[in-house]
Every structure is written in C-alpha cells, then in structure tokens.
C-alpha cells in the first residue's frame, strides 16, 4: 500500500498508529487508488460515543465497510491491515 501511495512503509505505519496525521493529498491518492469517494474516508474518521445507539450503529457499519474494502483489496493483491 505504501508503494502505491508513494510513501515509505514506516510513514504509513505512523499514520495508521496515529503518530502522524494524514494529509488531504494522501487521502485523495488513497480514495483514487481504491475508487472510494473522499467523503467516505471521512466517515471513518469521526470519533464515536459508544453510549449512543446511533454511534454504535455507525461503528458497526464502518467496520463492515472496512471488511468489505479489505476483501476488495486482497482480491486485487493489495495487502491491507484493519
């Protein structure tokens, strides 16, 4: 994935672990690579309050979407960690 985005594996790891913030340019590359609207990526970026039923539902939907994206990526030969 890092090579596809033109970044190092360590930089991608730092983004995934929350040590670095992702740039809008990188998000645009990611959305183009996976043919996913940029707005869909922001759906996953929200902080959820697990005590609210609507937020729990959004979290469940987001997890399902991530699993689907992972299956699509693995079918395309792309290694992704969720």
Image (cartoon, rainbow, N blue to C red):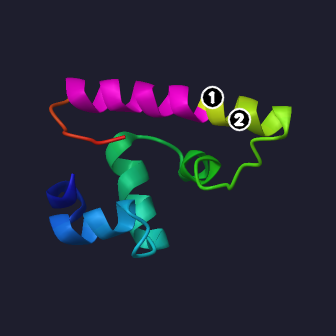
> As displayed, is residue 79 above or below residue 29?
above
Q: Which residue lies furthest to the front in this view?
A: 51
User: Mark 2 = which residue?
Assistant: 58
The part of the image, by quadrant, that contains residue 26 is bottom left
Asked whether the viewer can see residue 7, the reply is no
Q: How crowded is mark 1: few (under 14 residues within 10 Å), some or many (20 or more)?
A: few
Q: Is residue 79 left or right of residue 68?
A: left
Main secondary-structure element of the magenta-colored stretch: helix
Give the quadrant of the C terminus: top left
> Residue 24: where, in percent of width, then height?
49, 70
Mark 1: secondary structure: helix
> Label 2, label 1: how many angstroms apart (C-alpha)?
5 Å
Q: Nearer the viewer, residue 72 or 21?
A: 21
Q: In this view, does 57 lie to the left or right of 63?
A: right
> Residue 48: where, in percent of width, then height?
72, 49
Circles 2 and 1 in contact, beta carbons < 8 Å:
yes
Asked whether the viewer can see residue 3, the reply is yes
Determine the residue positioned at 67% across, 55% down.
Answer: 46
Q: Which of 38 and 59 is in front in this view?
A: 59
> As displayed, is residue 25 above or below residue 41?
below
Q: Is residue 24 magenta?
A: no
Q: How many numbered callouts?
A: 2
Determine the residue positioned at 19% across, 38% down.
Answer: 78
Could you say which disc has been placed on residue 17 in the image?
Answer: none
Determine the residue positioned at 85% across, 39% down.
Answer: 52
Q: Is residue 6 left or right of residue 55?
A: left
The part of the image, by quadrant, that contains residue 60 is top right
Q: Give the range drawn in magenta.
A: 62-75
Could you say which disc has been placed on residue 61 in the image?
Answer: 1
The part of the image, by quadrant, that contains residue 4 is bottom left
């Amino acid at each position: 994935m890092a090579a596809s985005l033109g970044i190092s594996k360590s930089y991608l790891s730092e983004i995934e672990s929350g040590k670095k913030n992702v740039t809008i340019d990188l998000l645009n590359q990611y959305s183009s690579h996976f043919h996913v609207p940029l707005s869909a990526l922001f759906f996953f970026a929200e902080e959820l309050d697990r005590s609210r039923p609507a937020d729990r539902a959004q979290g469940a939907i987001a997890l399902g979407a991530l699993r689907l994206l992972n299956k699509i990526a693995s079918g395309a030969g792309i290694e992704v960690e969720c």
